[in-house]
Amino acid sequence: EFVAASPGGPSSILKVTGLPANATSVELLRSMFPPGSRLEAMFGPLSEADYFRVSPTTALLNLASADLVTKALKSNNIANNTSVVGKRSVQVFRAKRERVFDGWQGVHRTYAASKLDTRLIVTGDVPPNEMYLSHHDMMHVSGLAPDTTLEDLASFFQPFSSDSRDVYGSSHIVRCSQGLPTGCAYVGFELPGEIDRVREAYESGRATIGGAEVTFRTVWDKLLRRGVRETARPARSIEELRSDLSDWERHVDPEDLKELERLGIEKGALDEAMMTLRHSNRTFAAADQAISGERLYQERQVGTHYRDAVRRYVKTLKECAGTKEDPGLMYWAMFYPDQEMDLGVFDAEKARIKELRKKGI
């Protein structure tokens, strides 16, 4: 049926024999006709539809014409490219003894001590620490083709993710000490339930990525003595985002605002100060909403940094503000105990503000 369906007839079919049993269609086509090369331009980009596996060691390729088959048979480049299909280099992995928790040390027993265990950890046995801590769930993928890229993994798992996948941050291809891919990778999922969608779609734990049959295994959590495993990233509505940007008054007591107004500090000035504070400092934006493990201040709850800054700003204003009738301790401290307090600065400030109001400032 494959030969009969060929537009060029049987004469446009190229037979390739002696293939390794583990060579995939994608690996064969990319090896024989490397992407972007003159060979690909001459023979045209071939897809899996132009490939048929007759046996574990034999495959048929559908070329455009009999003339291309003749050129392929005479091409030394294609012969050399085909000869390396399925060949794997010897891979060397670094192994080290696992470091395990060994109690608490320090005056207040706040520092975790560790010791070397008898178990050996080989490169690729565990996911990268930062990637593991920054994702809600983790999956191990084995059996990948050597030419599988991070973009291929992101494209495959995108339908199971609620947001656009981070190509370089949510996947990790395990490589040996020489930088060669091992056929294994770790894939992270940021939100709860995403990994369950993969399990439901592939109940057997097997799928095809890049022409190769791969196996999925869930990475199970281990007791963390150091670091915090991420929770689900918060999702906020448009109304909540707008409120976070402009509604600073919800963080303070209305009576404090009335007191500041009696002291001569108008609400318009506070609005301008708070908006500048919120919009000009990243630690009050995404950093304040970051999930545990990514926050600048781990001891703070999500969204409390800006709230605490607003409250401290208002409290400091109340402590520093003064009137001619009640200058306050800070102004009183500027004079010696037996020195007469000069209150003329309040009259000068009142006159200055009056002039500014005349100018519309």
Image (spheres, rainbow, N blue to C red):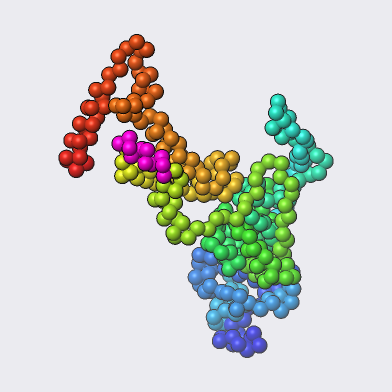
Residue 258 position in % (x across, y down): 37, 41
Residue 126 shown left or right of residue 311 in the figure:
right
Q: Is residue 336 visible?
A: yes
Q: Quadrant of residue 69?
A: bottom right
Q: Residue at x 36, y 20 (%)?
A: 332
Q: Residue at x 46, y 45 (%)?
A: 251
Relative height, residue 341 to residue 249 (above, below): above
**Numbered label tally:** 0
Quadrant where the N terminus is found in the figure? bottom right
Which one is nearer the viewer's eye here, 342 or 299? 342
Direction right: furthest residue: 118
Q: Quadrant of residue 209?
A: bottom right
Residue 74 shown left or right of residue 94 in the figure:
left
Relative height, residue 4 to residue 277 (above, below): below
Residue 80 position in % (x across, y down): 63, 64
Q: Residue at x 60, y 66 (%)?
A: 160
Relative height, residue 355 to residue 204 (above, below): above
Which one is nearer the viewer's eye here, 337 or 126? 337
Which one is nearer the viewer's eye here, 244 or 61? 244
Query: Is residue 359 inside the magenta stretch?
Result: no
Secondary structure, magenta segment, majority class:
helix
Q: Quadrant of residue 338?
A: top left
Direction top: furthest residue: 338
Quadrant where the C terminus is found in the figure? top left
Which one is nearer the viewer's eye here, 15 or 337? 337
Residue 96 position in % (x across, y down): 75, 41
Residue 10 position in % (x across, y down): 62, 86
Q: Is residue 93 visible?
A: no
Q: Residue at x 48, y 40 (%)?
A: 308
Q: Which residues are magenta?
A: 254-264
Query: Is residue 262 inside the magenta stretch?
Result: yes
